[in-house]
């Protein structure tokens, strides 16, 4: 890691010789965001990680999350704020992003009428793009939805997308207790339970989306007031019990139109909640009116199987690594084993996980089922030392948001497999 030096920039200064500061957009303990002009005179946003303020023991992990934020912003969707460039200045990393001059959704709603069907549809298409790439936003709230020049809504702040250590990240980058506290309003119950926080699923974002839409419609939070810290325990308890204020929503003119969607999003048990963005989109009132204006981005991976199926790491310590499953089979065997990289255990697919141990050493089993013509994934592995002969993983195996049992679940190109904090996308080749 290069030597890190303090660097303060003011209006008129140039960052890394290329980006001239026009104004300061925001600042936390370890991060600062500027409006800058690039060499072509285009206005952009530049986020600087103040690494000189970061304790040395967490610098590497924060830089990894910063790199992941840049990569996430490169996903091809009109409904995500795009990453444009990245670099370092005096050892401090920065990201240049698309500038959205109209502010965030929370400030816009306070000033003018907002088409909630348009908001919901654009946000859901942004989530759809993230989820198809194995990402979970994990911090969806009105402040993280920006309004573009053309009036489209786009998701931003991907620094903790898929990161299980969310609260530590917020404290380190934002450094503002009020913002940390406010984020709890949108968290699903499983995100607050450390035992269930090892694997982050798309249903996390779906719960947060339900909270956000309730807030936009009613100007209230669904589980009661959250004005003071002492309100937090009651608010979270009501969220865990699914006790949201249905009566107030139904008393509003448009409340009935949104009831089914919000009710499906706010189910406490993530397995019973609406499972996919596509299912939520079906419940958006008058969604066809907005969908007519949306051009879906094409898939950036192959879906037609020619030679076989591969798994690509979309989130994890070996981001981008590819495993061609059919080519990995040996002899008459149709089985591949996957688990955490460990010298004491053999896995055909050994996943590197040095910063945690959420992946079991014997996590799951992949099998090419010739009878159904598909790959199948099972939780756990055969272990002759285990009672019953089969050892299940500690934290579970998931395909999209569905938990996998030892009986297995078929998967196909486009599906996302989650084990611990690592996500792999199935693709054809």
Image (spheres, rainbow, N blue to C red):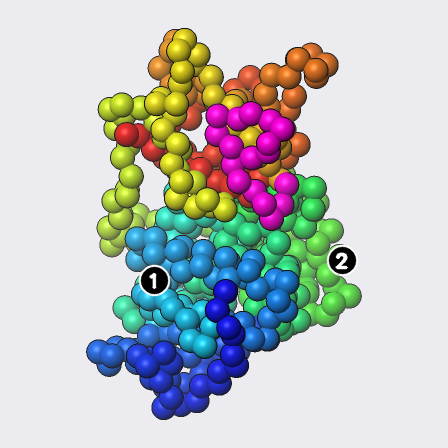
What residue do we see at 63% from left, 28% from top? 344
Mark 1 or mark 2: whose residue is earlier in sequence: 1
Secondary structure of the residue carrying numbered label 2: helix
Specify the label residue 233 is tagged with. Answer: 2
Is-magenta flag for residue 342?
Answer: yes
x, y percent for residue 276: 45, 40
**Residue picked out by circle 1:** 82
How far apart marks 1 and 2 lie (CA) works out to 37 Å
**375 up-or-down from 2: above or below:** above
Q: Residues within 10 Å of mark 2 (few under 14, many from 20)?
A: few
What residue do we see at 66% from left, 66% from top? 181
Q: 123 or 250, which is in the foreground?
A: 123
Q: 75 or 49, which is in the foreground?
A: 49
Q: Quadrant of the C terminus?
A: top left
Is-magenta flag for residue 371?
Answer: no
What residue do we see at 31% from left, 54% from top? 77
**234 up-or-down from 98: above or below:** above
x, y percent for residue 183: 60, 62
What residue do we see at 39% from left, 44% from top? 320
Residue 36 appearing in the image: no
Name, please, the residue furthest toward the left.
40
Q: Residues within 10 Å of mark 1 (few under 14, many from 20)?
A: many
Query: Can you tell which of label 1 and label 2 is closer to the viewer?
Result: 1
Q: Main secondary structure of the magenta part?
A: loop
**Side of 384 where 16 appears, left or right:** left
Query: Which residues lie in the magenta part?
Result: 341-357
Q: 17 or 414, which is in the foreground?
A: 17
Q: For residue 152, what is the image quadrant?
A: bottom left
């Amino acid at each position: 890691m290069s030597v890190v030096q303090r660097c303060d920039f003011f209006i008129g200064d140039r960052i890394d010789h290329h980006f001239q500061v026009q104004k300061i957009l925001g600042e936390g303990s370890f991060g600062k965001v500027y409006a800058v002009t690039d060499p072509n005179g285009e206005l952009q946003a530049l986020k600087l990680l103040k690494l000189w303020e970061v304790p040395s023991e967490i610098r590497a992990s924060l830089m990894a999350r910063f790199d992941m934020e840049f990569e996430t912003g490169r996903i091809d969707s009109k409904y995500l704020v795009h990453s444009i460039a990245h670099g370092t200045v005096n050892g401090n990393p920065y990201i240049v992003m698309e500038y959205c001059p109209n502010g965030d959704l929370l400030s816009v709603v306070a000033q003018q009428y907002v088409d909630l069907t348009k908001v919901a549809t654009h946000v859901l298409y942004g989530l759809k793009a993230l989820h198809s790439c194995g990402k979970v936003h994990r911090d969806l709230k009105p402040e993280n939805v920006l309004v573009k020049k053309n009036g489209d809504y786009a998701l931003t702040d991907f620094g903790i997308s898929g990161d299980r250590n969310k609260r530590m990240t917020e404290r380190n980058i934002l450094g503002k207790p009020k913002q940390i506290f406010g984020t709890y309003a949108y968290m699903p119950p499983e995100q607050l339970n450390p035992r269930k926080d090892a694997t982050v699923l798309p249903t996390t974002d779906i719960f947060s989306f339900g909270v956000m839409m309730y807030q936009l419609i009613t100007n209230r939070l669904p589980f009661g007031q959250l004005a003071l810290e002492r309100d937090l325990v009651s608010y979270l308890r009501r969220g865990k019990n699914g006790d949201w204020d249905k009566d107030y929503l139904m008393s509003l003119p448009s409340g009935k139109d949104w009831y089914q969607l919000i009710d499906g999003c706010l189910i406490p048990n993530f397995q019973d909640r609406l499972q996919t963005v596509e299912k939520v989109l079906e419940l958006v009132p008058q969604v066809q009116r907005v969908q007519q204006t949306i051009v879906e981005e094409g898939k950036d991976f192959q879906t037609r199987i020619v030679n076989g199926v591969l798994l690509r790491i979309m989130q994890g310590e070996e981001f981008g690594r590819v495993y061609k499953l059919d080519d990995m089979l040996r002899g008459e065997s149709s089985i591949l084993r996957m688990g955490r990289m460990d010298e004491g255990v053999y896995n055909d697919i050994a996943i590197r996980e040095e910063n945690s141990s959420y992946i079991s050493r014997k996590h799951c089993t992949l099998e090419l089922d010739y009878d159904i013509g598909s790959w199948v994934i099972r939780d756990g592995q055969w272990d002759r030392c285990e009672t019953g002969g089969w050892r299940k993983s500690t934290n579970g195996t998931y395909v999209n948001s569905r938990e996998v049992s030892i009986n297995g679940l078929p998967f196909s190109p486009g599906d996302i497999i989650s084990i611990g904090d690592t996500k792999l996308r199935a693709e054809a080749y």
